[in-house]
Image: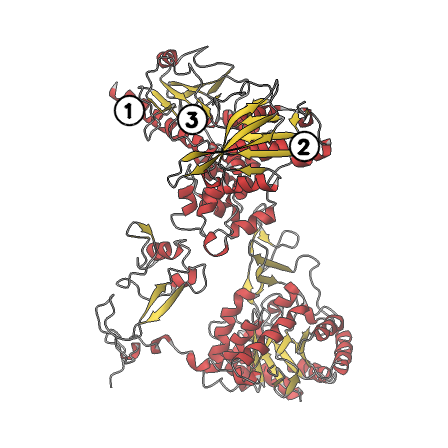
Amino acid sequence: MADLASEFLGIRSPNPFWLASAPPTDKAYNVNRAFEAGWGGAVWKTLGEDPPIVNVSGPRYSAIHSNDRRVIGFNNIELITDRPLQTNLDEIRQVKRDWPDRALVVSVMFPMNEQVWAKYVPMIEDTGADAIELNFGCPHGMSERGMGSAVGQVPEYIRMATEWAKAAASVPVIVKLTPNVANILPPAKAAKDGGADAVSLINTINSIMRVDYDTLTMYPATDGMGTHGGYCGEAVKPIALNMVAEIARTPETADIPISGIGGVTDWRDAVDFLALGARNVQVCTAAMVYGFKIIDDLTDGLSAFLDDKGMTSVSELVGRAVPSVTDWQYLNLNYIEKAVIDQELCIKCGRCHIVCEDTSHQAITHTVNGERRFEVIDEECVGCNLCVSVCPIDGCITMRQLTDGFDPRTGQPVSNEKANWTTHPNNPMRKTS
Amino acid sequence: MPDIRTNRLSPEEIARNFSELHPPLSRPEALIEADRCYFCFDAPCTTACPTGIDIPGFIQKIRSGNLRGSAHTILNENIMGGMCARVCPTEVLCEEACVRNTHEEKPVEIGLLQRYATDPIFDNDTQLFSRADSSGHRVAVVGGGPAGLSCAHRLAALGHDVDLFDREEKLGGLNEYGIAAYKTVNDFAQREIDYILSIGGIEVHAGVTLGQDTTITRLRDEYSAVFLGVGLSSVNWLGIEGEELPGVENAVEYIAELRQASDKGELPVGRRVVVIGGGMTAIDVAVQSKRLGAERVDIVYRRGIDQMGASDYEKNLAKTSGVTIHPLARPLKILGPGHASGVLFERTTLAEDGSFSDTGETFTLDADVVFKAIGQQLRDGVLDDGSIKMKSGKIVVDDNQSTSLAGVWAGGDCVLGGDDLTVTAVQHGKVAAIAIDHYLRTREKSHG
């Protein structure tokens, strides 16, 4: 079995799975249970100034469910820790003492005031914690008070607060970014410029889950009123992966270590984050939905995957897919694929036909020689992958590359030369050699 | 001495044996099952449904929590969708066509989902239908079974007034009198009829027998149009010695008695029961006899097991209920004396074209009761003057259920092409009603 031992900013943990700063890491009781279950590390739920904030005593969470009540997306309005600072510091100290082989990072959130950072950062470091994570991401509640995502949305603030934290800290400083921005690169760059040792992302996304269909008021609500929360869970993974990959593939930010967060539920999600440039992953929602036991599949599945790929460590996987991510303008416009339907596997549901017919290119039959039969019409197929996406049978529809001859759709010969938009004759801004 | 007794089983055993065969789905079960539907294009299940219910459509509405819309999708095509959800042989109709069968051999439970969608409508008496403005026409519908009820309901919805005649006191036809008790409990058949009639405009005339109390000729004179859904109420004869002996019974009558009995334990049942026939009725009477406490129940069918009219599911139900099926044997004689004591059979052999011939080899099965389940025929004298075109003892109709007699439509088991299924009868009634409506409205136009 491949060794999952992980090192992030010199912090060792038995595996690359850390619990993210969130409700599961609010108390020693929970973190101890997580470590007993096998989690590699934990980022303690965000600490703030005393006196502690207060939370609502009503619904803090809600979910988008499938019909069998599987949680697909999740939303929360819980604020940072509502326990006294000293209580948290005492527990952090004890947990780190009890679990020296696990990564223990402390998340913090302070106002934009250098003196405050200078006062609290040393207190936190004194617990023996391995690193500090700056919460510039929470989009609800704290952002109204000028913290959380209110900082993360302004690169200058990120840089400023990172500098204050670095000035006061001797342990590594991780900056946790908010996805509630138009472009993730300026915040990542600002963190780096401020001296951050790493970035972690994504925090949650501004969200309202739904309305109550009886009362036609926002749901969930606290005494009839609701407020936007932060969206997370499986549904947000693609958004997170894009932001991770953007940082990993952009030269100005490529060298900053990334801790990947956002919808990691099973080991394949971890493979996505690691291959797209994250050096470890953080998990919250999956644990809040299933409990800490999911760590068994996360570690076991990742280890088996590395074995299958002939890799001996997680680091061999990190960033492997990054070179395959590019801008649209560099995609090879001479490359041609056509869908192929395996008639042996086809169950004749006709979904491929109707979606292609109604919403795309009229490239799939419904009847051939009087029989119900679904075949790709190469003369119409643009290779869009919609049929593959909607087919209920995995592997029934695949894409086949045309390597020679003519494309029956355009009548043009298949070219093995690469050609992209930057040089395309239809591009008024094309480069000429 | 024949051993025929009541109360062979305790009331608890009877109650258990006659509880519902398929309990309804709970909400979580229904939602998970609904999620299994692939929402097929030009769905094979819909094509396989004789009434053409948009099955993926109603399942999608279950998924989205729109149960009333789901029920309307069902009942608008099949007003007896509640009963059909219970008695349809879905395993040879919609569920057989389900594409899920290809890889997993487990179709979507369409019948149970249909029941899930429609039950609340009947439980809460939610009226989903309204009547069009009155057309001023009155139509006679003869027969209060599925075909007649379906026709009457659609006619009423289209704005016509209906007089509905039935020779029994209770409407429902075979739905009320002919369906195994464990397939429809809690008096669902009557609740469904109440729902159908609640649309208004349907006046029921119970206890009226066509051919005795009224005639087709009279109905044609008095009404704008006539629909015949009279079913097949006369039991076929075996034409063998001993058929008139006590202890020889008609399966349909016994099933009807059982359905109407308030205490099923009070129904006499033989210790050894022999059923002659191979259709659903044979299975129903055999399984119910077993469930009433018969020690040994044998079904004997003259042709092969694959030729039986009963579906594979029904045949399995018989086997798992402890009924023995003997294919390839035909009755020669019912043994007496004075009361049926057994049946003498001759073994048959099957040719490739499905025809059978005798082998000369005989055997005897002991019996206290012998049930005839060999099909029914049109009652003599129903079609008074013989002017309606018939074939093989059934009424000939066209695609619109129109008979050879102007102004007369027919449907259900009494027509050629009827197949002993509620769902088919409902479709006949619906098609006829639409055709009658078209006929009346085009006639109005041409008469200015």
Q: Earlier in the sequence, mark 3 or mark 1?
A: 3
Instruction: Answer whether labels 2 and 1 touch (C-beta < 8 Å).
Output: no
Q: Earlier in the sequence, mark 3 or mark 2?
A: 3
> Which residue is depicted at the point 21% across and 68% down?
A411
Give the secondary structure at mark 2.
loop
> Which residue is depicted at the point 57% across and 70% down?
A264
Image coordinates of residue B389 in percent, x first then y, are 32, 21
Q: Amino acid at mark 1?
A: Thr
Image coordinates of residue A149 in percent, x first then y, are 57, 71
> Which residue is depicted at the point 55% across and 24% down?
B334
Residue named by callout 3 = B151
Give the secondary structure at mark 3.
helix
Instruction: Answer whether labels 3 and 1 touch (C-beta < 8 Å).
Output: no
Instruction: Answer whether labels 3 and 2 touch (C-beta < 8 Å).
Output: no
Q: Amino acid at mark 2?
A: Gly
Q: Which numbered circle lies on residue B442?
A: 1
